[in-house]
Amino acid sequence: MSDTIYKEIRKSHGLTRDEVCDKSLLLNNPIQPERLERIENGKFPITPDEVMLLSEIYGEPTLCNRYCSKGCPIGRKYVPEIKVKDLAQIVLEMLSSLNSMKKRQERLIEITADGTIDDGEIKDFVSIQKELEHISVTVETLQLWVEQMLADKKINMEKYNEITGG
């Protein structure tokens, strides 16, 4: 049986199960070593709360997105998997999509002005909808990048929270 992502990440951080469980106690959210072993070996499904806990312990915010997009039945339908990218690539993708939408803005207004989408408008509407979905994913990618930088202490969390009200 291959290792689950939870076991791989724990090992990559050089932690034992007991160390992870000790850290969970410090966060007032204890997980027992036996439970963690069963999760890591795929014998018990992990809960959303456990994903969030392990994400915090490991400093790996991508675990939450991975769980939502792959492990949760609702998320599999509605949550796209976010791929980690560098900031420059995220910004360039965002600017490209925003420029594309600026060019399509008038067409979107034409299509939606009457409150219906007729057969002659569907192709353009779907194309615009896909571009908007790409913008949404790019925004989520930027958010995940920020969360990772905060977890890695590359962004001052206290200052960030002060400004964002977090």
Image (cartoon, helix red, strand yellow):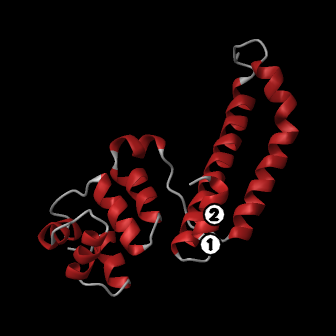
What kind of residue is marked 2?
A: Tyr
Looking at the image, which is closer to me, 111 or 79?
79
Label 1: state its secondary structure: loop
Occupied quadrant, residue 100 = top right
> What residue sits 43% from the left and 51% below the top?
69
**Residue 156's mark?**
1
The crowding category of the residue bearing disc 1, from other C-alpha atoms within 10 Å (few below 14, some 14 to 19, many at least 20), is few
Label 2: state its secondary structure: helix
> What residue sits 79% from the left and 16% below the top?
113
Q: Are marks 2 and 1 in contact (CB under 8 Å)?
A: yes
Q: Position of residue 71 (x, y in %)?
A: 34, 53
What kind of residue is marked 1?
A: Asn
> What residue sits 75% from the left and 31% below the top?
124
Q: Position of residue 150 (x, y in %)?
A: 56, 70
Q: Position of residue 56 (x, y in %)?
A: 40, 67
Any part of residue 2 in sight: no
Q: Is residue 37 left or right of residue 97?
A: left
Q: Position of residue 134 (x, y in %)?
A: 66, 48
Above or below for 135 versus 143: above
Q: CA distance from mark 2 to mark 1?
A: 6 Å
**Residue 160's mark?**
2
Occupied quadrant, residue 147 = bottom right
Above or below for 37 versus 109: below
